[in-house]
Every structure is written in C-alpha cells, then in structure tokens.
DNA sequence: CTATATTCCTATTAAACCGATAGGAATAAT
DNA sequence: ATTATTCCTATCGGTTTAATAGGAATATAG
C-alpha cells in the first residue's frame, strides 16, 4: 500500500547523483550506470525532471543534464510531483463537485487531510537532506 | 499518486454504514445497496474485515455482519491495513538488509519517515471521526 | 425435510497500469 | 561526415485490480 513507483525512486537517485556533480553535466547514461538504473528508461525520467524545471539539459555531444538549483532548495515533493503529478488519495480530493458520493461525502475530508499530511512531510524534506542522510 | 484502492474506499464506507446500525446485523447485500457498492465484490471485502477482527459475522438466514467495537475504538489505520496490509512506500522499509541499495541506502530513511507520517495520520483518526464528519 | 437466505471460498475475466525496450528524429560538437 | 547526446512515440510482457461467476457450507423458517 502506498508504494512508491520505481520511476520515482529512480528519479530521486538520479537527483542525488546530479547533486554530487555540483553543476557539471552528466549524461543520462552516466547517471544510469552510477545508480544502476535501466539507461533507456531513465531518459524519460530525466525529461520529466527537466519539464518540471528541476534540471537543465543540453543536447548533442558534450550534452547531458545538470543541476541548476541548490539541493537545499529542492523539496522532495517537487521531485515526486514532477514524476507522478499531484498526490491524490482519491480522485475527488481537488474538487468536491466531482465526488461520486456527492457534496455530503464524509470520507472525502479525511482523504484531504491525508493528502495534507503526505504533502507536508514531502515538502519539509529537501534533496540535500536525503542526499546527505 | 498514492491513490487509495476502490477496495479500501468500499471498506471504509461499509464500516461507516455498519457503525450507524449500532450492533445490529446487516447483510452484505444491504450494505452494498446502501453504499452503492458491487454486492458480490463487497463480500470479499467484508470477509477481510472479519479476519482482522473489525466485524463479526453470522451465516445463514438472519445472518450478516455486525460491529463489535465502538467506532471510536477503530483506527482508520486498522481498516486500511485489514484491506491492504502494512503500508510500505518501499519494500525495504521493514528490513534494511533487503534493500537492493545495501545498508548505505540514503533514501530508505526518508521513506521510513514517510511511512511514519502516513501511519500517524491514519492512527489518529477513528471510524467515529470519519462517520460523523 | 425442504426451501431459502446468507456467509464463505475459489476461479476467471477484462481492463488498466507499470517497467522496460525499440527505433528513430533533432541537435550539437569534433 | 561522424559521433554522441537529448528528445519523442510506440510497443511489449507482466502484474495488479475491479468485478463477475458458480457454488459449498450453514442457519432459519415453514
């Protein structure tokens, strides 16, 4: 229950790897080998991290990915959401109108609270915290 | 991300339904109709709740399920674990030895903390809280 | 004793999701 | 031109999940 996808775990390891490079470029292949992640699979993950603005990239020879933010400025929630989207214990968590049980749905408030608890934890830990242990 | 299965949502609604019955028996069909849950599917869910000791059951005519505990004594974590088992953001959360990254795995501590945050929230809310809003 | 209503158990299906792979287009350095 | 990279899309095999089906065991009612 509430298992974190391999994709998100890979993303976090890739980010900790990049964090150690202090702004230099690393190719997705290098990261994959360093972190034991399927190389081709990692490509798609790195792209998502880029779209989310968490890393920068350069194409062609000498290209790769690099960290543009300080690891202490990257919340773990940022990484998780970059890969998985917003955390939604139930689909109606954002919009009460969409709740199949109607506006009177009691469990919904409970799930909203759970989301807040999870978001809270993920937002109060940074990449720096995780990378340094 | 972190979506709660239909099974668990059904289980919670079934429990809130039973909570209103104040110890009287209700059949799984009655619960299913009251809560708009596929009847045959609910049977399996009720059985798990029984195995977990959260409800009592009687077979044959006049049979059904009934609540044996006070709703204020049932933690939401009990219901969730009855259906889904222990919460495990990552498989190595219980045993560091099993971690594919080895004992030096830094993210593991982070996931252990996440589990604690989720478990904490689920343990500090009871069925009574949810059923009454 | 029979008919009926229930829990209980196991198998099966259809769809969705997930991890991973494949094949290449676009781009940049050499 | 060659090479190394990001970028994009499609696909595959496996697993999980929601739901259904069919019936065995059990208890009540008549």
Image (cartoon, coloured by chain):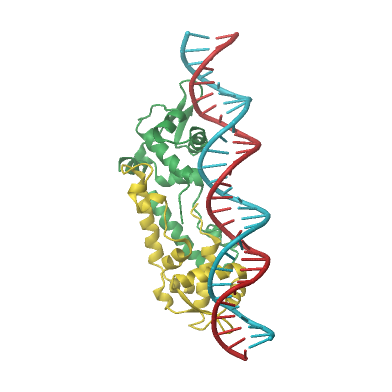
Chain colours: A yellow, B green, C red, D cyan
Taking depth in this image into account, of A75 and B129 the one nearest to the observer is A75
- Residue at 49 percent across and 43 percent down: it is B83
- Residue at 39 percent across and 60 percent down: it is A119
Taking depth in this image into account, of B31 and A126 the one nearest to the observer is B31
In the image, residue C16 lies at what x, y percent? Answer: 53, 50
Quarter assignment of residue A28: bottom right
In the image, residue A105 lies at what x, y percent? Answer: 34, 43
Quarter assignment of residue A70: bottom left
Q: Is residue B44 left or right of residue B74?
A: right
Is residue B54 visible from the viewing direction of this image? yes
**C3 lies above or below A121:** above
Q: Is residue A33 left or right of residue A92?
A: right
In the image, residue B75 lies at what x, y percent? Answer: 39, 44
Taking depth in this image into account, of C3 and B101 the one nearest to the observer is C3
Is residue A12 visible from the viewing direction of this image? no
Q: Is residue C13 left or right of residue B84?
A: right
**A117 lies above or below A129:** above
In the image, residue A62 lies at what x, y percent? Answer: 57, 84
Taking depth in this image into account, of D6 and B17 the one nearest to the observer is D6
């Amino acid at each position: 229950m509430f298992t974190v996808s391999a994709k998100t775990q890979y993303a976090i390891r890739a980010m900790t790897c990049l964090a150690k490079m202090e702004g230099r470029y690393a190719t997705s292949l290098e990261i994959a080998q360093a972190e034991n992640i399927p190389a081709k699979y990692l490509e798609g993950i790195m792209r998502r991290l880029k779209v989310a603005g968490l890393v920068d990239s350069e194409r062609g020879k000498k290209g790769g990915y690099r960290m543009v933010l300080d690891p202490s400025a990257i919340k773990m929630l940022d990484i998780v959401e970059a890969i998985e989207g917003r955390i939604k214990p139930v689909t109606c968590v954002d919009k009460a109108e969409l709740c199949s049980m109607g506006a009177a749905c009691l469990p919904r408030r409970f799930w909203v609270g759970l989301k807040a608890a999870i978001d809270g934890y993920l937002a109060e830990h940074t990449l720096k915290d995780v990378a340094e242990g």
